[in-house]
Amino acid sequence: MAAQTVKASGRIRRARPEDHARVTEIRNSVKENVLRDPGRVTVADYKWFERNPGVWVWEEDGRILGFSAADTRDGTIWALFIDPDHEGRGIGRALLAKACDVLREAGHRTATLGTEPGSRAERFYRQAGWIALHIDKRGEQILRLDL
């Protein structure tokens, strides 16, 4: 299936505190990379990202359709999730580019992330130039991108 172009009315902006519920809704609605251990992503974690490098959202017609966050402490992509009803439109590519920009601006030369092996997400990252490194102890495929 060919990727659709993103509507011109969409924009990336920094998340505000009142966006947290919608971001959580999107995170919990995904079909792959399901958060099986909610203790791995706490409200405190989210609040740190919100205050520091930022959680970035794709907003279209006043509705958040996806979000990303990069960890400037270690050069990882902490989150990239799109509302399943809006996948395949380029929103993920735009939010991934924003997360990579955040890492680049913080001085990182490479970025890493973990995702479910064999998932659509893994294929998405590989198509974007990410290189598979190894499977970690949690069973996630670790990928790297030179920034």
Image (tube, rainbow, N blue to C red):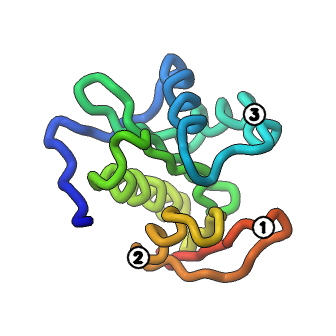
Residue count near mark 3 (Cα–Cα under 10 Å), binned few <14, some 14–19, many ≥20: few
Image point (51%, 35%), residue name: 26
Label 1 and label 2: CA atoms lie apart by: 21 Å
Residue 129 lies, in percent from the top left, at: 44, 79
Name the residue nearer the viewer: 128 or 99: 128
Image point (48%, 72%), residue name: 123
Q: Which mark is residue 73?
A: none
Q: Secondary structure at mark 1?
A: loop
Residue 19 lies, in percent from the top left, at: 49, 23
Residue 66 higher or lower than 21, as above or below: below
Label 2 and label 3: CA atoms lie apart by: 30 Å
Q: Does the residue at mark 2 contact the one at mark 3 (Cβ under 8 Å)?
A: no
Q: Secondary structure at mark 2?
A: helix
Q: Locate residue 115: give its quadrant.
A: bottom right
| Nearest to N terminus: mark 3 or mark 1 | 3
Q: Which amino acid type corresponds to the residue marked 1 in the rendered image?
A: Gly
Label 2 or label 3, whichever lies nearer to me, is 2
Q: Does the residue at mark 3 contact the one at mark 1 (Cβ under 8 Å)?
A: no
Residue 6 lies, in percent from the top left, at: 21, 48
Q: Which residue is mark 1?
A: 139
Label 3 or label 1, whichever lies nearer to me, is 1
Q: Is residue 88 left or right of residue 80?
A: left
Image point (51%, 62%), residue name: 121
Q: Which amino acid type corresponds to the residue marked 2 in the rendered image?
A: Gln
Q: Which amino acid type corresponds to the residue marked 3 in the rendered image?
A: Thr
| Nearest to N terminus: mark 1 or mark 2 | 2
Residue count near mark 2 (Cα–Cα under 10 Å), binned few <14, some 14–19, many ≥20: few
Q: Which residue is mark 3?
A: 42
Q: Which residue is mark 2?
A: 127
